[in-house]
Image (cartoon, rainbow, N blue to C red):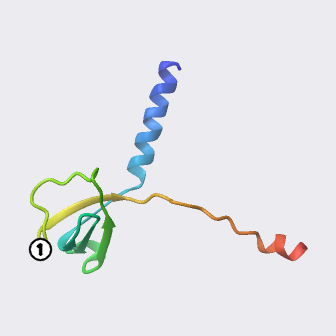
Amino acid sequence: MTKTRILAAVAAIAFATSALAYQVTGEVLDVTPTTITVKATGGKNKGEKFEMSRGADTKVTGDLKKGSNVTVEYGIAAKSVEVKADKAAKAKK
C-alpha cells in the first residue's frame, strides 16, 4: 500500500468513528457489569433516560456508582440489516 492509501484509510476510519459518536451528561440511575443507565441533566434531552451496554473494553475513569454525575460517550452501530422488497416490486408479481 502506498503512503497516500494508508493515510486515506486512517482518515476514513477516524471520520466514520467520530461521525457516530454521541455523548450524554447526567446522573447514573443504575449501573451493572453490562449496562449503565443515565438520566440527562441538561440540553434538549433533559430528563430522558439513556441505557447503554458496556463491557470489559469500556473505559471508566473514577468511581462509577448510582448517583454519580457522568459524561458518557457512546456510539451507534448496526448489528443487522434486513432489506424489504419494494412495494412496486411486490405489485408486479
- Measuring from the top left, give residue 50's x and y in whole percent: 30, 73
Relative height, residue 71 to residue 91 (above, below): above
Other residues around mark 1 within 10 Å, as few (<14) / some (14–19) / many (≥20)? few
Relative height, residue 39 to residue 2 (above, below): below
Residue at the image position 25 percent from the left and 81 percent from the top: 47
Q: Which residue lies furthest to the right in this view?
A: 93
Q: Quadrant of residue 63?
A: bottom left
Residue at the image position 14 percent from the left and 53 percent from the top: 61
26 or 79: nearer the viewer: 79
Relative height, residue 9 to residue 59 (above, below): above
- Measuring from the top left, give residue 11's x and y in whole percent: 43, 35
- Decide if residue 87 is on the left or right side of residue 23: right
Element carrying mark 1? loop
Residue at the image position 48 percent from the left and 31 percent from the top: 8
Q: Residue furthest top?
A: 2
- Decide if residue 13 is on the left or right side of residue 88: left
Q: Quadrant of residue 40?
A: bottom left
Count of all numbered marks drawn on residues in the image: 1
Q: Quadrant of residue 20?
A: bottom left
Q: Residue furthest left?
A: 63
- Measuring from the top left, give residue 32's x and y in whole percent: 23, 68
Residue at the image position 22 percent from the left and 51 percent from the top: 59
- The quadrant in which the C terminus is found is bottom right
- Measuring from the top left, give residue 70's x and y in whole percent: 17, 64
Tell me the residue that label 1 is attached to. 67
- Decide if residue 61 is on the left or right side of residue 86: left
72 or 32: nearer the viewer: 32
The disc labelled 1 sits on which kind of residue?
A: Gly
